[in-house]
């Protein structure tokens, strides 16, 4: 199968003739992924399906997402704020200790102890806040993710609520659930400038779990093993890896990653705590095939769609850049409100260039917008037009 | 993680002291799988998770099944009646032709043409008729499968009904849906003695699909690519690989695999067409962990359960050889009536040897029996007692 790079729509808009420009941008994209070997700590991933942006940032190819119900671990994107801790921390997974604070009886709890409390399996989208950043027309710093900083993942672990209850319940006055990552802090740096510590509204406890398993296997180190805080419906950054502390707190973490990073604000504005934090994900979808060309006649248009924090109501596909929409069909079982669903539309395509777009609507009645406003860090892009692909039919 | 071999209960029954015997039979089992390299055509499988019985028969390790919602392709068992055809047949998948017969307008249809008709994704258990054969007390020929000739698989393809309708509908008088495999017939052998051709009641059309994708990727050659007939709820043998002919027929296939093989009959009796054929699967479940030993205290007992051709109603676990049962909890989303569901029970185990067993009940109200009758070829074993494991708690 021909592997096609993730299509960067903004390049198409800049260029004049769709096909030529697509071919031109395709080439460097190919070189980037096929030339760059996988970093050692994720050497077990499928290199063919990944784009290596850097050692800490690897994206799944758009074509590889296809109509997958579940994203295999070997294809799942990587975005680590800090290098992964050494292998030793997964040598005895059940011995991993988490400090539980802001509860009636604060103290430590091991993964082994958590396993005696309760178990839950949840399927949810894991998606980086910057997924879709490459599709903004303004320049942004940060990894130029297109659609591949997202996957649909099966997590198994203990509900956060069961852990908090086992420690006597949250203190009065708790407003946030705060998780601290166990990454090593490089020497000489003040921890608060770099340590991964995120606070989310305590209501997220309703669905949050502490996961020790991903896709039915022990959680890989690269993805936060032995234990990761997973908050279904929330952007990736809140899913703290190598969780070493979990606290019910009255205040948000004082760390940079909470206070000023991951804040949505206009272009040119600095981050501050008054701005919205990257918490709940929005309704979103994108086409995963065809991406470049197709033969005339009937063709299957594929993609994936997610409702954010609510289930999906419907998915529509346009083959004429959004002038007309047809309802497409979800494929396979519904894996719950936080999961994505692959979709397909069989449609007739005539000769020429077609802009294929998809537009999801969730059960809360929210429809994916045509545009998402430009913002300083390029977060949260779910605009359907930016995610569209130009396909040449001949 | 320590990989534990699939436990062969009948060996336990023969021996006297559970632990000692378990240790003794564990050793050759280990040697069998760890020593035997994977055959070339399935070299992409995860050797650590597989038991190689022969070149055409590979079993998934019981511990590897764990509480997996979906069985990764790299772990899925292999049971091929004939060697897989050469790689060339998956070079141009859409060009693969199937002869459609017993319809108003018989003729050929390519996979590419099928893709213009309709698409469906279904999750279902793929299970060999002989899964559980090793647990019978009587000697049986055939692969000594314990629990690992089964997996939960995502299939995508065209509904059989859409293909039949596109060819003008089934002929009057059609009673069976007959699929013919594209394996090469060894020279000098009469085809009917060896060719894989199976007939199933035409009612199976309600759920049958012709699948070109497995677990979100093009169907691997080893599993029947480019096209396989998949009949959710039916034993593996009916899911004809390399499908080259699909026919609505008045009679069952005259081939041996239909007429006399895969027939359930008493021990010592020859197969004949009057005996039940291995069609619909039965309600079944088994423990996947712990398998050998555990520490005293609270422990998670895991397993997988399937309803056969109906959804699951409940799953019970016994830790005392079936004297007492506790309802266990299904893990994760329900993937439909033909899929399996992982389950877990957190329970307290005291020092000593415990026989862990599981017992599923489906929505049709059928409960997995304690014993399944011995039969000539060792088919269809779903007795809960035979599938139990002895675990030493200290």
Image: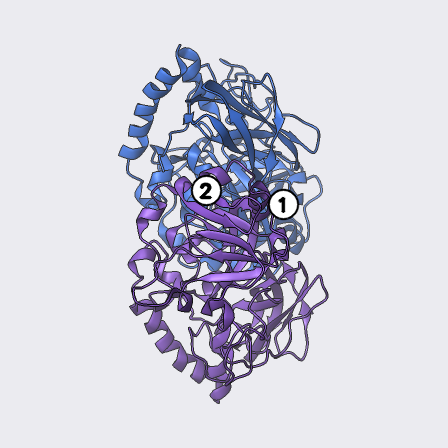
Chain colours: A purple, B blue
**Residue beneath the point at 40% across and 77% down:** A26
Closest to the observer: A170 or A80?
A: A170
Estimate how packed mark 2 is, as few (under 14), some (14 to 19) or many (20 or more) residues with alpha carbons within 10 Å: many
Q: Which residue is mark 2?
A: A111
For the N terminus of chain B, give its image quadrant: top left
Q: Position of residue A383 (x, y in %)?
A: 59, 75
In this rendering, is residue A199 above or below B342?
below
Disc 2 vs disc 1: which is toward the camera? 2
Tell me which chain the residue with mark 1 is part of: B
Q: Secondary structure at mark 2?
A: helix
Q: How many marks?
A: 2
In this rendering, is residue B172 above or below A313?
above
Q: Which residue is mark 1?
A: B102
C-alpha span from label 2 to label 1? 60 Å
Q: Is residue B106 visible?
A: no
Q: Secondary structure at mark 1?
A: loop
Tell me which chain the residue with mark 2 is part of: A
For the C terminus of chain B, give its image quadrant: top left
**Picture quadrant where residue B32 is located:** top left
Question: Residue at the top extreme?
Answer: B16
Q: Position of residue B86 (x, y in %)?
A: 36, 48
Q: Position of residue B97 (x, y in %)?
A: 50, 54
In this rendering, is residue B30 above or below A10?
above
The label number, if any, that marks residue B305 in the structure image: none
Closest to the observer: B241 or B165?
A: B241
Q: Position of residue A91 (x, y in %)?
A: 33, 43
């Amino acid at each position: 199968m021909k592997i096609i790079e993730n299509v960067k729509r903004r390049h198409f808009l800049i260029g004049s003739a769709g096909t030529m420009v697509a071919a031109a941008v395709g080439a460097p994209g190919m070189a980037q992924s096929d030339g760059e070997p996988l970093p050692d700590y994720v050497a077990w991933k499928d290199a063919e399906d990944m784009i290596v942006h850097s050692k800490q940032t690897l994206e799944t190819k758009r074509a590889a997402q296809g109509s997958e119900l579940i994203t295999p671990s070997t294809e799942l994107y990587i975005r680590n704020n800090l290098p992964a801790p050494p292998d030793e921390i997964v040598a005895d997974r059940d011995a991993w200790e988490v400090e539980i604070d802001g509860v009636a009886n604060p103290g430590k709890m091991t993964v082994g102890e958590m396993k005696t409390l309760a178990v839950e399996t949840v399927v949810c989208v894991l998606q980086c806040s910057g997924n879709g950043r490459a599709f903004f027309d303004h320049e942004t710093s940060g990894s130029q993710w297109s659609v591949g900083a997202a996957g649909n993942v099966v997590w198994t672990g203990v509900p956060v609520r069961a852990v908090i209850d086992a420690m006597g319940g949250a203190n009065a006055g708790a407003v946030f659930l705060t998780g601290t990552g166990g990454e090593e802090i490089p020497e000489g740096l003040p921890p608060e400038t770099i340590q991964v510590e995120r606070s989310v509204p305590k209501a997220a406890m309703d669905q949050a779990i502490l996961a020790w398993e991903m896709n039915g296997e022990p959680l890989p180190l690269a993805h936060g093993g032995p234990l990761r805080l997973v908050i279904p419906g929330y952007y990736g950054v809140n899913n703290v890896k190598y969780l070493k502390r979990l606290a019910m707190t009255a205040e948000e973490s004082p760390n940079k990653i909470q206070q000023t990073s991951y804040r949505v604000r206009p272009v040119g504005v600095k981050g501050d705590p008054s701005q919205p934090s990257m918490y709940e994900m929005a309704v979103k979808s994108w086409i995963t095939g065809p991406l470049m060309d197709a033969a005339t006649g009937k063709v299957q248009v594929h993609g994936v769609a997610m409702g954010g924090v609510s289930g999906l109501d419907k998915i529509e596909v346009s083959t004429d850049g959004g002038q007309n929409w047809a309802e497409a069909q979800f494929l396979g079982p519904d894996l719950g409100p936080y999961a994505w669903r692959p979709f397909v539309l069989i449609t007739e395509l005539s000769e020429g260039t077609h802009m294929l777009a998809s537009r999801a609507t969730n059960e809360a009645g929210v429809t994916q917008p045509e545009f998402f406003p430009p913002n300083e860090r390029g977060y949260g892009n779910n605009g359907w037009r930016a995610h569209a692909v130009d396909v040449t039919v001949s």
